[in-house]
Image: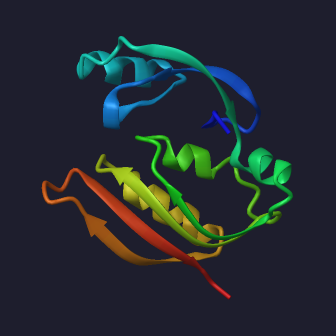
Amino acid sequence: MNACLNPYPYPAKLNFNKASNMGRVVHDLTVQNWLKQWKLQENMIEVQCFPLYSILLSLNQTTVDFFSLDVEGDELRVLKTIPFDKVDIKMVTVEYINQPGSVGDLNKFMVEKGYEPLIKMHKDDGTVTDVIYRKKT
């Protein structure tokens, strides 16, 4: 499938910035300003994006053993599109960029959805962290 995960709960064509390892969907002014700050506003393409749930339904697969999410800053927004009452995701790794409130908001959301944080993995320079969550049984 040549598509992206939509940070909104519906399919849409969105601009995608192909900035090497910092590429991401460009869906609002915050992202546009971020791209300008890093001088990454060139190299855009239009891509079809889907919510994860739509992709899982198209595959007739609503049970996921392991899900790794790294979408350069839209992780929580993508997670909020998932109807966790209709999808059984057993373990999730989520990257987040260290910004005020980001890990707290992420942890709060995941705990509300029935997950417990297991491990935090930090990049050496401290800018990026991955958190592994396990669904409580």
Question: Relative to residue 20, is residue 59 drawn left or right?
Answer: right
Which one is nearer the viewer's eye here, 9 or 49?
Answer: 49
The C terminus - image quarter: bottom right
Decide: is 115 above or below 7: below
**Can you give x and y, in whole percent of width and height, for residue 25 in the image?**
51, 28
The residue shown at (62%, 68%) is: 112
**Can you give x and y, in whole percent of width and height, for residue 1 in the image?**
68, 39
Decide: is 93 above or below 101: below
The residue shown at (46%, 14%) is: 44
Which one is nearer the viewer's eye here, 60 or 120?
Answer: 60
The residue shown at (41%, 60%) is: 104
**Can you give x and y, in whole percent of width and height, for residue 3 in the image?**
64, 33
Decide: is 30 above or below 103: above
The part of the image, by quadrant, that contains residue 5 is top right
The part of the image, by quadrant, that contains residue 2 is top right
Question: Relative to residue 2, is residue 97 drawn left or right?
Answer: left
